[in-house]
Amino acid sequence: MSDTGEMLRLARQRKGFSQKEAALKLGVVQPVLSRFENGVSVPDETILLRASQAYDIPRPFFDVRAPVYGPAVSVHPMPRAKADVTARDLDMVTAELNIRVMQMRRFLEAVDFEPTAPLPQLDIEQFESPESVAAMVRAHWAVPSGPIKNLTSLIERAGVIVGTSDFGGASISGMTFRVPGQPPLVLLNERHPADRMRFTLAHELGHLVMHRFPTATMEDDANRFAASFLMPTADIRVSFEGRRITLELLASLKLEWKVAMQALLMRAKSLGFVDHNQNRYLWQQLSSRGWRLSEPPELDFDKELPTVLKSIVKTHLGALGYSMTDLCGFVPIYEREFLKMYGPIDESGPSRPRLRIVS
């Protein structure tokens, strides 16, 4: 269980402050703050009140006693982004994930989230390839051939909690937190387009299914899993066979398969429908049009909205009679931050049937 020092560190990391920066804000020298955070010394009430103000978090936050976890297998070293992710970025998003996990533990004390499909555990080292694992998961879940209509709903049915975050502006596409006794939590970058969010979610599913421990190839494994899960070989071949691979074709297939043009091009290359020279030419064309950074907006489609998190919150506000103040007090944060995490909650209408109130 956490102590006051660990919660003090978590609050600091959540804001992205270095220990030196935070010490200045609290009016102490850095070695003193280090002793507080490491449990060598106990901060007095004056320090905790200063920390509450400096870290923009309610004073009772420091009284929470719950496990605090470091980066999990699918957090380090695997933010799915080309830009460098700093240690400060990782501390910041890991702090957010810890707070969300603490909240989920409280939420699930009163509400059971009941999966309707099992989440397979298929260690990649025991199988031929990530592509074969992806095919097994699709078969296990009886996913129809062709494009997956709603990937988020499919994964939520398997007991994975899906949410969104801006990750404090860090160059991160998605992260997964899996802690003992709770459903896995996957957060996706809410600023990304729908096609990238879907691929990221499939990527994170690959980690959940295939990786219990870090491996040197885990990122490549997860990308290959995601490509095959979203675009199975036998199905996507039909879209490529007998057709010249052009930007126009990739654009038309994007709306059908709900993946980026770039993902389709890489899949076509991996399956032998594009040779080296043609592949290089098409990437040059994507670059010259600026589509490697942002694909044409007319090809955008609606983002898939996670439903389970909001349903859990809605059940507490409705059937269980909690107020927003009560929910913000589970792991004390201000309401504006709670709403940033979960969005506005519509309390009308029935709760989702896979949530069961615990008596």
Image: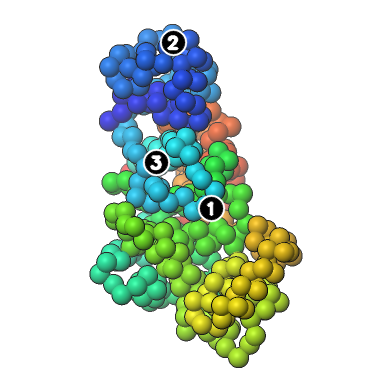
Which SS class for mark 2?
A: loop
Residue at 65% from the left image edge and 74% from the top image edge: 281
Viewer-proximal residue, 137 or 38?
38
Q: Which residue is at the front of the view, 158 or 129?
A: 129
Q: Which of 166 and 323 is in front in this view?
A: 166
Question: Which residue bears the numbered disc 2?
Answer: 28
**For residue 127, what is the image quadrant?**
bottom left
Residue located beneath label 1 in the image: 82
Is residue 176 in view from this perspective? no
Q: What amino acid type should be assigned to the residue bearing mark 1?
A: Lys
* In this picture, residue 148 sits left or right of residue 113: right
Q: In this view, does 55 lie above or below 318?
A: above
Q: Is mark 1 on a helix, strand or loop?
A: loop
Give the label on residue 55, or none. none
| Circle 3 residues within 10 Å: few <14, some 14–19, many ≥20 | many
Q: Nearer the viewer, mark 2 or mark 1?
A: 1
The answer to whether marks 3 and 1 mark residues whose Cβ atoms lie closer than 8 Å is: no
Q: Which of 101 and 224 is in front in this view?
A: 224
Which residue reaches farthest left?
126
User: In the displayed structure, does residue 237 sit left or right of residue 123?
Assistant: right
